[in-house]
Amino acid sequence: MVEAVASTNRNFDPADVWTILEEVKDPEIPVLSIVDLGIARGVNECEEGKLEIIISPTYSGCPAMYMLEEQIKETLNHHGFLDSIVTTQLSPAWTTDWMTEVGKQKLEAYGIAPPEKTTSNKSVLFGGQKKISCPKCKSDNSEQISEFGSTACKALYRCLDCLEPFDYFKCI
């Protein structure tokens, strides 16, 4: 993350901008900020003295990105950073590896199984499924019901012990 920032709009410590960005929540998972998700990638000063925030979508075509851009500008404006610029960066592509550990803990507390450490699922080569821990009872005895859950970035699972369905935030 780029942290060197200056602005003619307001004097600040670069860490303040990252703290402010924590206020911008994901519209699909409101317990996560764009910092938790790793969507916020950088903070820069433009030649015009405006603040530039660099973001990467969780996946190409994510419908929430326009809304997030507006929320970022509105939040920064509220904190004295006027006319901020939001730049979407597609390369490198976003990965669940960019999520913070705090963000993964928030996901689990919210009832969504966080992504695992690896993005590969070799078990499907042999007809198997990933065994994902239930965020409610912590059992690994689960089964995938659908490759797609409440959003495209999640899969739907069911715990075979407590019988509760839950979303799994897929590794990307």
Image: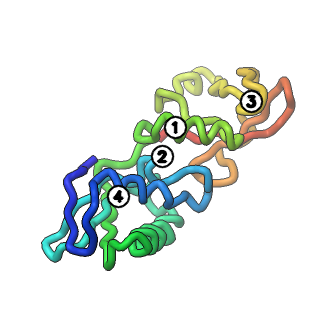
| Comes first in the chain, label 2 or label 4 | 4
Do we see residue 29 in this rendering? no
Q: Is 143 positioned to the left or the right of 33 in the image?
A: right
SS for dot 3 = strand
Q: Secondary structure at mark 1?
A: helix
Residue 29: x %, y % from top left: 61, 53
Three-letter amino acid code at the position of disc 2:
Asp
Say the numbered circle drawn on residue 102.
Answer: 1
Of residues 76 and 144, the one nearer the viewer is 76
Q: Amino acid at mark 1?
A: Val
CA gap, disc 2 and disc 4: 14 Å
Between disc 3 and disc 1, the foreground one is: 1
* Image location of residue 1, percent across then percent down: 28, 47
Residue 65, which numbered label? none
Badge 3 or badge 1: first in the primary sequence: 1
- In front: mark 4 or mark 1? 4
Q: Position of residue 101 (x, y in %)?
A: 49, 34
Q: What amino acid is labelled 3 in the image? A: Glu
Tag 1 near tag 2, CB within 8 Å: yes
Label 4, label 3: how far apart the Cα atoms are: 41 Å
Residue that mark 3 sits on: 143
Q: Secondary structure at mark 4?
A: helix
Q: Nearer the viewer, mark 4 or mark 3?
A: 4
**What residue sits 46% from the left and 41% below the top?**
99
